[in-house]
Amino acid sequence: MHRAYFSSIERGERNVTLQTMRRVAEGLDITIASLMSDAGL
């Protein structure tokens, strides 16, 4: 994934699919649940 895509996610300009969340979590070597809890969701 391109860094501009990540940036637009961080700014709330994109709605993220579960598949994208899975790819992000895998890239960070964490679970989706951990990713969500770190985001305060």
Image (tube, rainbow, N blue to C red):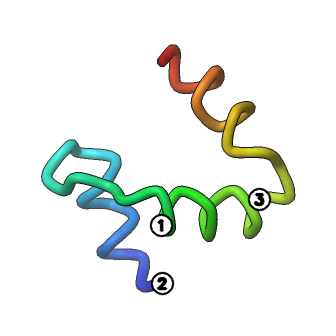
Residue for badge 1? 20
> Are the two marked residues, 3 and 1, in contact with CB atoms closer than 8 angstroms?
no
Q: Residues within 10 Å of mark 3 (few under 14, many from 20)?
A: few
Q: Is residue 18 left or right of residue 30?
A: left
Q: Is residue 39 left or right of residue 17?
A: right
What amino acid is found at the position of numbered circle 1 in the picture? Thr
Q: Residues within 10 Å of mark 2 (few under 14, many from 20)?
A: few
Of badges 2 and 1, nearer the viewer stands 1
Can you tell which quarter of the image residue 17 is in? bottom left
Q: Is residue 23 above or below residue 34?
A: below
Q: Looking at the image, which residue is at 64% across and 21% down?
A: 37
What amino acid is found at the position of numbered circle 3 in the picture? Leu
| Residue 33 spot, x, y in % from top left | 70, 33
Of badges 3 and 1, nearer the viewer stands 1
Q: Looking at the image, which residue is at 77% across and 59% down?
A: 28
Query: How far apart, in angstroms, are the residues tagged by discs 2 and 1?
Result: 9 Å
As drawn, the label of residue 28 is 3
Residue most extreme to the top: 40
> Are the two marked residues, 2 and 1, in contact with CB atoms closer than 8 angstroms?
yes
Query: How far apart, in angstroms, are the residues tagged by discs 2 and 3?
Result: 13 Å
Residue for badge 2? 1
Q: Looking at the image, which residue is at 22% across and 52% down?
A: 15
Label 2, secondary structure: give it.
Answer: loop
Q: Is residue 6 above or below residue 41?
A: below
| Residue 34 spot, x, y in % from top left | 74, 32
